Image (tube, rainbow, N blue to C red):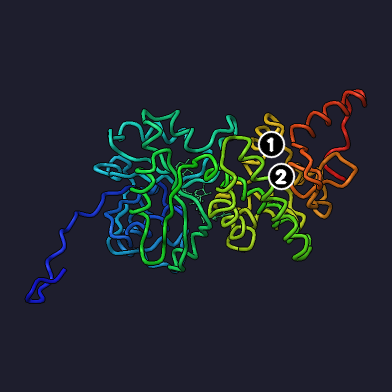
Amino acid sequence: MADRKGRTAARPTTPPRRIAVLGAGSWGTTFAKILADGGNDVVLWARRPELAREINEVKRNSDYLEGINLPRNLRATSHLGDAMRGAEQVFVSIPSQTLRSNLEAIAPHLAPSMILVSLMKGVEKGTGLRMSEVIAQGLPIEPERIAVASGPNLALEIAREQPTAAVVSSESLETAQAVAMAATNRYFRSFVNTDVIGTEFGGVLKNLIAVAIGIVDGVGYGENTKASIITRGLVEMTDFAVAYGAEAVTLSGLAGLGDLIATCESPLSRNNTAGRLLGQGYSFNDVVKQMNQTAEGLASVAPILRLAEARGVEMPIVRQVSQVLAGTLDPKDIAPHLTTDDDEPQGERTTDDGQGRSRTSVWRSLKRAFDQLRDGGGSTGGDRS
Ligand SMILES: NC(=O)c1ccc[n+]([C@@H]2O[C@H](COP(=O)([O-])OP(=O)(O)OC[C@H]3O[C@@H](n4cnc5c(N)ncnc54)[C@H](O)[C@@H]3O)[C@@H](O)[C@H]2O)c1
Ligand SMILES: O=P(O)(O)OC[C@H](O)CO
């Protein structure tokens, strides 16, 4: 504000927030750039000293973000303790299956007021736990200090400073807001919510649908097939997440529909790419060998199907992805099945029969169990209609 002589009062300056980002792959490095470009004091932890050196000396991460110049104020280290010392917020971006073992190394450096933010989009294979749940189990930290960030966030596009939005979620709105404030700059905007379950599952489930899209792309099917799978996939995502306590509206937001569109449409997506290789006829093992970056969807399929079964949620598309991965379904036979075991047409919404009559997935599970008993415990015909 100007005084009567037109002089502008100096704004009170707050020191930049100290922030640590753990994991210098494509997303960790990009997120560190987002935070540094937002005026924060960021230290990025890289496992390999030579990568930390490259980031510090030439402001590049040539392994993961070719051609991207990193901010001058971004520092890197291969010492976890140095990265975390004094940090208000610690963002974690490593493959989901490695989180639990890394928490043992993180624990000694955890300070009482630190906020932990998961940037990861997978569930733990053995337990089916979301990343925020693994953090809560593995560290002495209250849920109010845990947050997750998700959304349509293809790393390379953001590293090129293309305008993008994300959502930060925490049980504590205050925590979500503090993280969103830090993770906002001229090309990146963070919204907030308190639906951690919906936000996290959105990021996990869209990967599985993106694998399906990659598969049909690899086969050579066109836009009708893809649009059908995306639309029916969103129904599966929503049914599943709601069954686990999410709010349906979250799945139609950035962390659900938004991320589903980005991941299904982009050749930059590793999940989409993995699916395309499967659709082109490569085996699961060949695909894993060819992927030199993390495609979370491949490890999440089995635990998600187990969780779906436990709550009576039908996920025909995800089930077909698991069959293609197992080599038991020809990629060209993948289809946006409406249901796995009903012969008669059903309503587009899983909770009705087309005439508004209630017809829940629990009902269908019971029917399937009954059919199995009637047929002597044999298969009801799998997922093919
Ligand atoms: N890349 C994206 O566009 C993007 C966007 C949003 C979310 N994510 C999520 O971020 C997470 C990380 O993905 P990414 O794209 O950075 O993967 P990446 O493959 O590019 O990098 C993974 C990083 O983790 C490190 N790492 C591998 N094994 C490790 C271990 N055992 N212990 C510690 N560190 C290990 C690697 O050295 C590398 O730095 C995933 O859950 C992914 O779904 C990625
Ligand atoms: O490359 P993917 O398939 O891991 O997707 C990256 C991000 O999750 C897109 O939001």
The tag earlier along the polypeptide, 1 or 2, is 1
Quadrant of the image for the C terminus? top right
Are discs 1 and 2 less than 8 Å apart at CB?
Answer: yes
Under mark 1, the amino acid is Leu
Question: Residue placed at 69% from the left, 56% from the top?
Answer: 230
Q: Can you tell which mark lies on residue 200? A: none
- Mark 1–mark 2 Cα distance, whole angstroms, equals 7 Å
Q: Residue at x 75, y 57 (%)?
A: 228
Callout 2: SS = helix
Side of 69 relative to 127 (left or right)? left
**Horizontal and vertical percent for residue 311?**
68, 31
Label 1 sits on a secondary structure element that is: helix
- Left or right? Give the position of 62 relative to 255: left
Which residue appears farthest toward the left when viewing the image? 5
- Give residue 382's quadrant in the image: top right
Residue depicted at x 53% and y 43%: 200
Residue 277 visible in the current orientation: no
The quarter of the image holding the N terminus is bottom left
User: Which residue ends up furthest to the front in the rendered image?
Assistant: 356
Q: Does residue 318 show up?
A: yes
Q: Which residue is mark 1?
A: 305
The image quadrant in which ligand 2 is located? bottom right
According to the picture, the residue beneath numbered tag 2 turns out to be 318
Residue 183 in picture, x, y percent from top left: 37, 55
Q: Position of residue 135 (x, y in %)?
A: 44, 34
